């Protein structure tokens, strides 16, 4: 099992390059509101946006991904936030948004903190059918992957049973990807990341 995680981490580093390490010390950068234009973000693609001392992911779901997320029973997520999470630099959205089926303001846009809630490594996009997704778990529908911890997340940021790392402590295995506070302009073309 450990060899498989090392292999997946190697593939991930080749695909994404640097930035897979632990969360940097957030005390050196203050969070400030940021506008991100998403009008030309294609379905199935992801942006990584610097926000404060960290990065936020903005992913445009495909119609199939939205249908899959809304038609399946969604797992309950662990609402606890790990003690290391720097809420002052990486604030969290409302609890209602965290618990909704799509965990987003709009069905097709998923906005999330890129650092994993378990050890803080940056998650990477592993699309359905990609070599990376196939190497993670047979039959996994794709999503996001934590190469340090070995957990896969669906396109709503929930940990997926098909790609859960059996070595993860039980109290951490149901932690979802956390969501930053944001709002969307009236034309649904700009996301405003907030620091509240």
Image (cartoon, grey):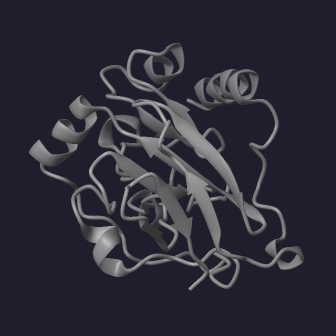
The x, y position of residue 145, in whole percent, is 53, 39
Instruction: Let me know if residue 166 appears in the view.
Output: no
Q: Name the one closer to the observer, 109 or 79.
A: 109
Q: Residue furthest right?
A: 28
The x, y position of residue 66, in whole percent, is 23, 41
Q: Name the one closer to the observer, 66 or 95.
A: 66
**Point 12% across, 50% down: residue:** 73
Q: Is residue 177 above or below residue 60?
A: below
| Quadrant (top left/top right/bottom left/bottom right) for the C terminus | bottom right
* Image side of residue 146 versus residue 127, left or right: right
* Image side of residue 194 versus residue 176, left or right: right
**Point 49% across, 36% down: residue:** 41
The x, y position of residue 35, in whole percent, is 61, 63
**Point 27% across, 35% down: residue:** 65
**Point 84% across, 70% down: residue:** 25
Q: How many marks?
A: 0
Instruction: Let me know if residue 156 appears in the view.
Output: yes
Give the quarter of the image for residue 85: bottom right
Q: Is residue 184 above or below residue 96?
A: above
Give the quarter of the image for residue 161: top left
The x, y position of residue 176, in whole percent, is 42, 60
Q: Is residue 98 above or below residue 106?
A: below
Give the quarter of the image for residue 6: top right
* Image side of residue 164 versus residue 191, left or right: left
| Quadrant (top left/top right/bottom left/bottom right) for the N terminus | top right
């Amino acid at each position: 099992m450990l060899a498989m995680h090392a292999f997946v981490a190697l593939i991930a580093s080749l695909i994404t390059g640097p930035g897979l390490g632990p969360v940097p010390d957030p005390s050196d950068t203050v969070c400030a509101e940021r506008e991100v234009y998403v009008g030309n973000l294609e379905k199935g693609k992801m942006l990584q946006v610097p926000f404060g001392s960290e990065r936020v992911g903005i992913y445009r779901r495909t119609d199939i991904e939205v249908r899959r997320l809304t038609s399946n029973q969604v797992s309950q997520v662990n609402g606890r936030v790990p003690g290391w999470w720097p809420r002052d630099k990486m604030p969290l959205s409302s609890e209602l948004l965290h618990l909704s089926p799509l965990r987003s303001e709009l069905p097709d846009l998923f906005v999330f903190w890129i650092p994993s809630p378990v050890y803080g490594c940056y998650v990477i996009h592993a699309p359905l059918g990609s070599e990376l997704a196939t190497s993670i778990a047979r039959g996994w529908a794709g999503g996001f992957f934590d190469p340090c911890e070995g957990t896969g997340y669906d396109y709503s940021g929930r940990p997926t049973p098909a790609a859960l790392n059996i070595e993860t402590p039980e109290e951490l295995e149901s932690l979802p990807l956390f969501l930053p506070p944001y709002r969307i302009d009236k034309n649904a073309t700009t996301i405003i990341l907030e620091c509240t």
